[in-house]
Amino acid sequence: MQQAGPGLAAVATRRKAISAAGLAIAGAAGLGSAPRNRITFGATLGAYPKLNAAVPRAIGLRMYFDGENEFPSAWPDPHPSAWITLSLRPNPDDLFSGKLDDQLKAVIDSAPAHSELTFWHENTTGNPLGYPSYVNNARAAVRMQHHGHRLCRGTQVRFGVITCGPAIQQIDWLAPGLDWYGDDLYEFPRLRGPDGTISQAKILARLNSNLDAWRKKSARHWPAIRICETNSPFDSHRKNWFTWIAQWMAGHNGRRMLTYWNPDAGAAQGGLSGPWPPSRAVIRRLRWLSEEYKGADDQLIPWGAGHVPHPVSTV
């Protein structure tokens, strides 16, 4: 028979500690009493079924159609309960001419609530995914974001942009006024301490710097934020990595945090991810975080409730 008393006490103590840490993070960012919001956790398609089985509240799903002008005929539905963040790659000239509008509207108009769309994710300075030059330039990037945002107006799809690397260096690549601003964030070597340990200070500095960029482009004090891919290649770092990011997200209108797992891109291969499953301790932490921030209940809250955006002060 379980002894409930000590277990409940331990949970209460841990919750107080994490809440206190979250307040400390908000204070360190100079944001005052930032509102605490819910977070939907999830993963990319290959890992989603196993993660969702282990972490039932993790219903966020990242999907990609990586061929140029390769679109589904309707909004994809591989797992009916999942909330999908979809990446597409429309040819810029075809998009700007309106040639793709009917195809894209068929996808967008068939989407359920809580659907999110982006074009050409990680289309940023440095070109990490090796996009062609007619895609990887600031003018095309911003025009595509504006066009996608217009196509999504009046639908159940929210359109955003996904960066990679310091967003503050990509200001000219971001369209203003999007529904959300996202980042693919991994434990890059520069986010570690000099001895290779995970550095909370460097992680928070990156997140706060990104927030600065998103505030400037959105003209909102609390722009809607997403982390669309995230992981550490070191299993011993993952509990802290996921916890610190979730704490920060919960105080900064970060509503969706999606993990990425790749067996061919772990520490042994010099990558930034690794295979699912991680250790049991990491799974327990992901489950606990999903319960603590209750992302799956977000469907009960209207879009933007509790986070009414207002212009950034110029004082």
Image (tube, rainbow, N blue to C red):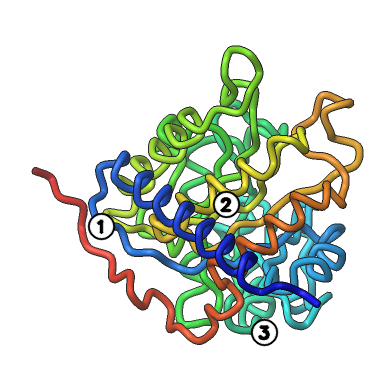
In this picture, residue 231 sits left or right of residue 154:
right
Q: Residues within 10 Å of mark 3 (few under 14, many from 20)?
A: some
Q: Residues within 10 Å of mark 2 (few under 14, many from 20)?
A: many
Tell me residue 22's x, y (percent).
Answer: 41, 51
Q: Residue at x 50, y 87 (%)?
A: 300
In this picture, residue 7 sits left or right of residue 24:
right
Tell me residue 314's x, y (percent).
Answer: 13, 45
Residue type, label 2: Ile
Tell me residue 239's x, y (percent).
Answer: 67, 45
Q: Mark 2 points at which residue?
A: 227
CA–CA distance in space, label 2 to label 3 = 25 Å
Residue type, label 3: Ser
Residue type, label 1: Ser
Q: Residue at x 83, y 70 (%)?
A: 53
Q: What element carries label 1?
A: loop
Decide which of tag 2 and tag 3 comes sooner along the chain. Answer: 3
Q: Residue furthest left?
A: 315
Q: Can I make out residue 215 in this image?
A: yes
Identify the disc placed on residue 110. Answer: 3
The N terminus lies in quadrant? bottom right
Q: How crowded is mark 1: few (under 14 residues within 10 Å), some or many (20 or more)?
A: few
Decide which of tag 2 and tag 1 comes sooner along the chain. Answer: 1
CA–CA distance in space, label 2 to label 1 = 22 Å
Decide which of tag 1 and tag 3 comes sooner along the chain. Answer: 1
Location of residue 261 with respect to 284 vertically, above or below: above
Q: Mark 1 points at which residue?
A: 33
Q: Is mark 3 on a helix, strand or loop?
A: loop
Q: Residue at x 82, y 24 (%)?
A: 270
